[in-house]
Image (tube, rainbow, N blue to C red):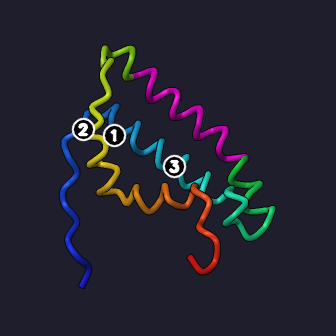
Amino acid sequence: MVPELPPLPALTRSEGELVDRYLEIVDLLGRINPSRSRDTYGALRAAQALVGRATALREALAVMHDRGETEVHTGTLGRALRVLDGERRTSLVAVPPPPGH
């Protein structure tokens, strides 16, 4: 039985886009991470996709700014990232500890 996840906090559409685009980039960076990637082709494909995802992230932030959403609600967005497995996903960007630690 799969454990029930806590509900996502209420987000504006723009905040949801920001979180989604950010996590897409994190996932790609995890695939590119030379301490974790297994082959150059997979890392190359992720790097190619990164350009488009970075553009989408920039657009999400521009929409927020244009709508007057000038403040980033870090507590709320942090909760959303945790619900969406952001801690595990961002850990794949970091250099893993050396073997035996």
Gap between marks 3 and 1 measured at Cα = 12 Å
At x 33% / y 34%, what residue is drawn?
15
Mark 2 and mark 1 lie on one chain; the one further toward the N terminus is 2
The answer to whether 62 is drawn above or below residue 18 in the figure is above
The answer to whether 66 is drawn above or below residue 8 in the figure is above
Amino acid type assigned to the residue bearing label 2 in the image? Leu
> SS for tag 2?
loop
| Residue ID for mark 1 | 16
Mark 2 and mark 3 lie on one chain; the one further toward the N terminus is 2
Quick one: quadrant of the C terminus?
bottom right
* Disc 2 to disc 1: CB gap under 8 Å: yes
Amino acid type assigned to the residue bearing label 1 in the image? Gly
Picture coordinates of residue 84, whole percent (x, y): 35, 57
Is 26 left or right of 29, judged from the image as shown? left
| Residue ID for mark 2 | 11
At x 46% / y 21%, what residue is drawn?
62
